[in-house]
Image (cartoon, rainbow, N blue to C red):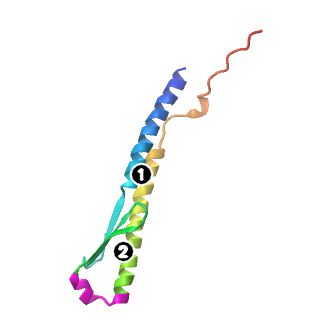
Amino acid sequence: MQGYSSMVDELDRQRADLARVRKALSELTSRATSRDRLVAVTVNARGLAVDITIEPAALRRYRADQLSGLLTTLIAEADAALRTRRDELLDAAMDSDIDYADARIPAEPRPQ
């Protein structure tokens, strides 16, 4: 029964870890900033832009099409960084040292 008890303990630990990971994933954000530091974007856990910062100098430096392209690039960079962090969190959550192969409860013998 020791194997069963340790398996239940491990499942409880994993359940708690998954709740922690789910919360961390839902709160993830990522920010990307242009090289000249005039434009920055922040994306949320769903990859949606939730903040865009454009310094006044950027409006003088970039044409509209350049600024649009820069914003698109920064959003993609922020989203890629966020996906990497999300994958790291999920990989860490999936690590388990317990072997479930021998965790079967032996059947009780049938009365004769």
Question: Whole-percent x and y of residue 34?
Answer: 30, 76
Residue lying at 55% horizontally and 34% vertically, measured from the top left:
99
* SS for dot 1: helix
**Tag 1 residue:** 89
Going by the image, does 92 lie left or right of 106?
A: left
Q: Amino acid at mark 2?
A: Leu
Q: Which residues are magenta?
A: 56-65
C-alpha separation, residue under disc 2 versus residue under disc 1: 23 Å
In the image, residue 19 above or below residue 69:
above
**Tag 2 residue:** 74
* SS for dot 2: helix
In the image, residue 7 above or below residue 38:
above
Quick check: is 61 in the magenta stretch?
yes
Q: Point out the residue furthest to the right here.
A: 112
Residue lying at 41% horizontally and 47% vertically, measured from the top left:
21
**Front residue of this view, candidates 69 and 52:** 52
Question: Whole-percent x and y of residue 29?
Answer: 35, 61
**Front residue of this view, candidates 55 and 5:** 55
